[in-house]
Image: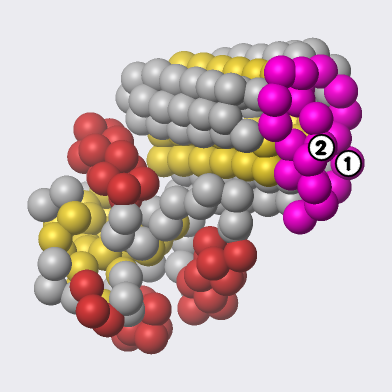
Amino acid sequence: MMKKILLIGGGGHCISVIDSIEKIGTYEIAGIIDTADKVGNKVGGHPIIGTDDDLETFYSRGITNAFMTLGSIGDTELRRKLFRQCEAHGFSFPVIMDPSAVVASFTTIGNGTYIGKGAIVNREVSIGKNAILNTGCIIEHNCHIGDFVHIAPRGTIAGNVCIGHNTHIGIGATVIEGKTIGNDVFVGASSNVIHNIKHNAKAYGNPCKVVEPR
């Protein structure tokens, strides 16, 4: 018998996660949590059944697994808030890894992290909790990826890179080997990061340059 899982957030990212969960076959999707005006709608064939005010009720009914399907483009505040709210109610967050992803040995992955279609994670990588490694991204050996990080589709992270918490690496961006990117950084799409980036910065371009603090 499959365990039931509650999905938190009914946007576009939810559709990707639903497909991965259905292909894995470990969990039965009990429904989706979103805003009150969306209750009754469906996402990827699954109903929106309540709001975050209903989390405790669903947990008391025996749905003890949840997964954050609210995406993030540079701002993780709501994801962090809802994740901690679910944890406070007692929900467990599994790792969801699409069957097409390739993850090497000696890799650690924090709870609630999503690894999408065609993503590649090489050996001896550590990934924090509730991160998103999106479609076709590449994380090379000996990297450290912080909590609530989003590596967007086709993002490429070379070996020995450290990426801090809550940071967003845009679509098609590249980070060369050995660089450090701080917490709460936004790296724009198709950027080429060849220098370290300190905390709380917005940066883009080729080569990538800090354009303003966040």
Instruction: Tell me which amino acid carries mark 2.
Output: Val
Q: Position of residue 3 (x, y in %)?
A: 27, 55
Q: Quadrant of residue 30?
A: bottom left
Q: Position of residue 205 (x, y in %)?
A: 70, 25
Which class describes the residues within 10 Å of circle 2: few (<14), some (14-19), or many (20+)?
A: some
Q: Quadrant of residue 162?
A: top right
Residue pointed to by mark 1:
198
Verify CB contact (< 8 Å) between mark 2 and mark 1.
yes
What residue do we see at 57% from left, 71% from top?
81
Which structural element holds mark 2?
strand
Instruction: Tell me which amino acid carries mark 1.
Output: Lys
Q: What is the CA distance from the residue labelled 2 to the residue labelled 1?
A: 9 Å
Seen in the image, is 205 located left or right of residue 43?
right
Residue pointed to by mark 2:
210
Q: Quadrant of residue 56?
A: bottom left
Q: Position of residue 41 (x, y in %)?
A: 13, 67
Which residues are drawn in magenta?
Answer: 193-214
